[in-house]
Amino acid sequence: TMFIISTPDDAGPRIKLRGKTGRGGSEVVIYSHDHTGLFAITTAMLDRLRLNVVDARIETTSNDYSLDSYRVLEDDGSAVTDEEREQKIITALRNGLNNPYQVSLNVTRRIPRQMKHFKIPTEIEFSQDQPNQRTILKLITADQPGLLAQVGHAFSLCKVNLKAAKIATIGAEAEDTFFITGEDSRPIEDPAQLQCLRESIIRQLESDDLEPDRVSI
């Protein structure tokens, strides 16, 4: 991506927003130093900006950078088309990534009433990808606002690093695959940590006691 190549190394996170894509929606591309919590912070900010993530690609490079692409929609299902809105999104994301400790990971939007009628049980499966030294987490659940922010929060609580992800929404169902490691950058084999992750994700997704909006970005 040209904007990545042409930006000096000391410029902080590189963020680009394409208002419309061939697949519909808008694309937010972020190139940043990889660090624990990057995914959680980014998805929390997207939630506070009231953007719904339709699909995403997360890739960690060999030089400890993360190249992330999120396809997003506004609450009404439209792409981001207003230039002022585009700049507000880029500025908010940059401020959040530059000041991670000031970002609340709590999801701020309640599940719309019509979405509660879709009874899709949450399924979580773990497997080990030993050749690539990572653990694979497959998640199937009902799609809802802030879904990835909730999963990212669980990753932070259980001290899990995200190395790559493939996010897909099919109708009312989300089918997501996360490639994760522990803080030592090795596969997670400790049953207690895997159980922590499973319970934290389910607790986050099933919680209906979400905070009201506290900030306006």
Image (cartoon, rainbow, N blue to C red):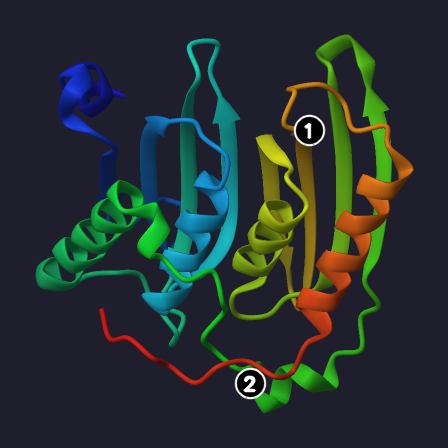
Q: Residues within 10 Å of mark 2 (few under 14, many from 20)?
A: few
Which residue: 18% across, 24% down? 3
Measured as percent of width and height from the top left, residue 122 is found at: 81, 62
Q: Is residue 164 left or right of residue 158?
A: left
Q: Is residue 48 left or right of residue 123?
A: left
Q: Secondary structure at mark 2?
A: loop
Q: Nearer the viewer, mark 1 or mark 2?
A: 1
Q: Is residue 21 left or right of residue 125?
A: left
Quadrant assignment for the N terminus: top left
Measured as percent of width and height from the top left, residue 126 is found at: 85, 38
Q: How many marks?
A: 2
Q: Tell me: residue 7, above or below residue 62.
A: below
Q: Amino acid at mark 2?
A: Pro
Which residue: 76% across, 39% down? 137
Measured as percent of width and height from the top left, residue 133 is found at: 73, 14
Q: Earlier in the sequence, mark 1 or mark 2?
A: 2
Q: Is residue 134 left or right of residue 100?
A: right
Measured as percent of width and height from the top left, residue 152 is found at: 56, 50
Residue extending furthest toward the left: 84
Which residue: 64% across, 53% down? 154
Q: Secondary structure at mark 1?
A: loop
Q: Amino acid at mark 1?
A: Gly
- Nearest to the observer: residue 82 or residue 42: 42
Separation (CA) of disc 1 from disc 2:
34 Å
Q: Which residue is mark 1?
A: 182
Q: Which residue is mark 2?
A: 112
Quadrant assignment for the C terminus: bottom left
